[in-house]
Amino acid sequence: MSTEASVIQEATTAVEQTGGIAALGINGKLFLAQLINFLVVLLVFWKWIYGPIVKMLDRRTETIERGLAHTAELEERLKKVEMERAGIVAQAQAAASNLLEEARTERAARHQSAAEETKRAVASIVQEGKHRLGQEKERMIEEVRAELADIVVEATRKVLGESMDEQRSSALAEEALRTVKGV
Amino acid sequence: MISVAAEPLFSLGGFPVTNAIVNAWIVVLLFTFLGFVIRSRASLVPKGFLNFMDWAVEFLLQEMEKVTGDRARARRFAPICLSLFLLVLVSNWMGLLPGVGSIGVHPTHGGEDVLIPLFRAATSDLNFTLAIAAFSIVATHVFGILALGPVAHVSKFVKIRGIVQALKHGPMDVMVAVVEFFVGLLEIISEFAKTLSLALRLFGNVFAGEVLLTVIYSLVSLVVPLPFLFLELLVGIIQATVFAMLVLVFLKSMTEGHAGEDHAPAVGAAAH
């Protein structure tokens, strides 16, 4: 206890001898000098270190944000283009499908009309053929009839010894022909 | 024997140049050189050391933002808080460099050979710690006035308006207002206490570290001091952080209304 008291006493004496606060080294000039030192560091740090770095950080952030915004804008535009492309493709597909359908319909119509025309042509050809055949048949019958009449006249002439006159022989031929027609 | 006060080496036109102020000048030169390098090489795509500085500033701003609660205030307070942090940190660590505190002149004082070191950590000089503490507290008031206006700021300490308003309500309110008025006066005293507390905490920790290292070195010079040296490295960064963080908290509480005032003493008490 006495040691503690003597230490305190010594400290007190020392402080008193050195002028109180001066024992801790407090000195107005030094205080001011240290304050100026700090102010210089503060200024240097503020203007030369912190300022440029923060400016760079801001610029970098701005650049990144601008890049991201640009990317988003591009993505948006890409989406729009993609949608437009899909729309155009869908439109083209629809148009192609319509064209195909129209072509099919037209082809079917043409096919049908061609078939009908062919049918009509065939029918007309058949008709004409029939008509020609009929005419030919008529002509042939006429020829056969004429030839048969001649044959009958000749035969009759041969049988009767050429005694019959021309008027009688024609009448006979006519008779023979009627018989043939009746057959 | 280590002197509590920084030892004067020589006089420059009546100005006592102490070993602590020599260290402070070295730190100032170091910062000026660093600032010159960074200013001339700052670019959008930094490399090497500048990259590290970018990261450090960004990281410290984020940490400050956790205290201030918003980016704008963190950026406004950053120059003061970061320069305090870096200055204290570099000064603390410079005191651990070989030669600091051990290389010096040996004048004879009272028949005894006394060592006066050429270099001494600037933070182990009370003039330095008191200067930066006083500046910080003044800065908190300047920021407070700028943020709230002079009337609102002074009303935090001189609460006359409360008494005038309480007169309309009744004697009980007047009593409370009078008590608050005296609390306001106590707040003024606490501002001085804050300054002293900031200065003495930093000075005490760094000076104690120096004494500890000197004692250890005088006992065993090899290997044994190493853990203590690492401890002092840690103390250096912790004290720098505590100082800067406290100033940040004071700045925050001064720029806020009455609601934010009670945080500062709690953090201040925790730092002790």
Image (cartoon, rainbow, N blue to C red):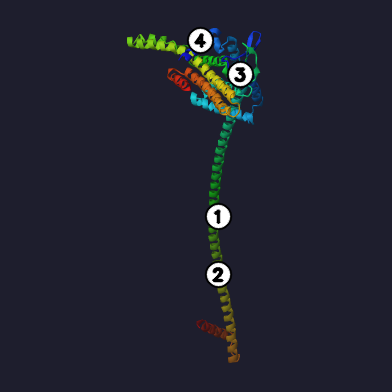
Q: How many marks?
A: 4
* Camera-side mark, 1 or 3: 3
* SS type, badge 2: helix
Q: Nearer the viewer, residue B114 or A154?
A: B114
Label 1, label 4: how far apart the Cα atoms are? 120 Å
Q: Residues within 10 Å of mark 4 (few under 14, many from 20)?
A: few
- The residue where tag 2 is placed is A126
- Residue B267 horizontal/vertical position (percent): 46, 22
Q: Are marks 4 and 2 on the same chain?
A: yes
Q: Residues within 10 Å of mark 3 (few under 14, many from 20)?
A: many
- The residue where tag 4 is placed is A12
Residue B170 visible in the snapshot: no
- The mark found on residue B268 in the picture is none
Q: Are marks 2 and 3 on the same chain?
A: no
In the rendered structure, which disc, 2 or 1, sits on the residue that comes first in sequence? 1
* SS type, badge 1: helix
- The residue where tag 1 is placed is A103
* SS type, badge 3: loop
- The mark found on residue B120 in the picture is 3
The amino acid type found where label 4 is placed reads Thr
* Camera-side mark, 1 or 4: 4
Label 2, label 3: how far apart the Cα atoms are? 135 Å
- The quarter holding residue B44 reads top right
- The N terminus of chain A lies in quadrant: top left
Label 2 lies in what chain? A
In the rendered structure, which disc, 1 or 4, sits on the residue that comes first in sequence? 4
Q: Are marks 4 and 3 on the same chain?
A: no
Pointers 4 and 2 in contact (CB under 8 A)?
A: no
